[in-house]
Amino acid sequence: MPALVLLGAQWGDEGKGKATDLLGGSVDYVVRYQGGNNAGHTVVVGDQKYALHLLPSGILSPGCTPVIGNGVVVDPSVLLSELSGLNERGVDTSKLLISGNAHIITPYNVTVDKVTERFLGKRKIGTTGRGIGPTYADKINRVGIRVQDLYDESILTQKVEAALDVKNQLLTKLYNRRAIAVDQVVEELLGYAEKLAPFVADTVLVLNQALEDDKVVLFEGGQGTLLDIDHGTYPFVTSSNPTAGGACTGAGVGPTKISRVIGILKAYTTRVGAGPFPTELFDEDGEALRRIGHERGVTTGRDRRCGWFDAVIARYATRVNGLTDFFLTKLDVLTGWEQIPVCVAYEIDGKRVEELPYSQSDFHHAKPIYETLPGWSEDITSAKSFSDLPKNAQAYVKALEEMSGAPISAIGVGPGRDETIEINSFI
């Protein structure tokens, strides 16, 4: 019953797509369990680069069944466009399964997301504007539209009417926007039903039966630990639970079925959007990390904020997720620095703090305390084993492992599928 959870251990964009793809040939199912098309994964296969936004990375692995779980919010137009793009490139997408209980991102969710961010002005959260938050809000408020609703026009119409009763009041009276017509929304959503029908399934049943049959199931989180709605840097977070516990609720499997939890760590730290970021760099080093690491959001297109590795965050991710392993990515980006600072603690109000403060105010005022490690100049992209790495690169990895609280079992030394050093097998 090998069930693995793979998730981001920082603020997202750590390279989860590559890690999932690396494991894809060894697993039977890859499951997205939360988020929507606000999460972007880049996977490089040979000379081909694939940018995935909503689809599980396992869709690129022949023999693997990709699953969109009940905890995901689905924009049908984005999903169908992504499927079409892959089909045109010769990728077989016919095995995809979509939970009938997954919620639909409607046109009015996108509208509300965008106008709300504009209305907040300087206080905006920095959302992607894709309707993710409003869709999760509708889910909690019990006025959400689920995939299964596309196959009952009467229920769909009633639900859209209920949702728009309040939203049209908000749009017209607060935001000075036009009301959205119920019939128009229903017609658009019904137009997706036939195209999505071949993929819709009872994924909870499918996944639990697969685990009972000793199939290998990999649960793939979007975003990262510090963007978790409960455990992240609230309110600058996403609207779901990328942490390990989210895999259980977002896919419908019990926690006793999870055998391994793998955290993806970038060899430095990045963040997209607003919110505190203690190690953020505003100098030439920050610009160099951005340029060499190609740090631009796959989904948003926004430049990522860059900073040195933060061991405090890594320890926190280990704790809240129960991490058993780390996959360290983009070690090659650090080649060329004579000295590499690593944040080992924070200074808050003149005091040294070793762990992530629970207080939002304290975290906003946290200043990084650095230890400096010697860098390396040798090209490491052709390294096939840990011993192939320069001594200083080996020492850097070992230091991060000790500071973070879990073993580093794989290291990314380049963007390609084969540019990975596997120290310990994940399966």
Image: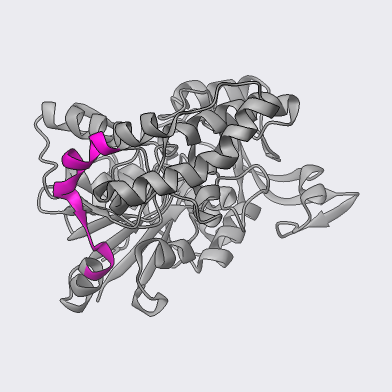
163 is higher (above) or lower (below) than 220 = above
Q: Residue 23, located in which quarter of the rendered image?
A: bottom left
Position of 327 compared to 61: left or right?
right
Residue 194 can be seen, yes or no: yes
Q: Residue 171, located in which quarter of the rendered image?
A: top right
Residue at (49%, 28%) from the top-left corner? 180
Position of 322 compared to 51: left or right?
right
166 is higher (above) or lower (below) than 98 = above
Q: Is residue 191 magenta?
A: yes
Residue at (55%, 49%) from the top-left corner? 137
Residue 44 location (% of width, % of height): 25, 33
Which residue occupies the foreground of this view, 50 or 153?
153
Residue 80 location (% of width, % of height): 24, 34
Residue at (37%, 29%) from the top-left corner? 184
Q: Give the range drawn in magenta.
A: 190-205
Which residue occupies the foreground of this view, 138 or 69?
138
Which residue occupies the foreground of this view, 220 or 183?
183
Dominant secondary structure (helix, strand or loop) of the stretch shown in magenta:
helix
Residue 39 location (% of width, % of height): 42, 39
Which residue occupies the foreground of this view, 358 or 180?
180
Position of 172 compared to 239: left or right?
right
Q: Does the magenta stretch include residue 85?
A: no
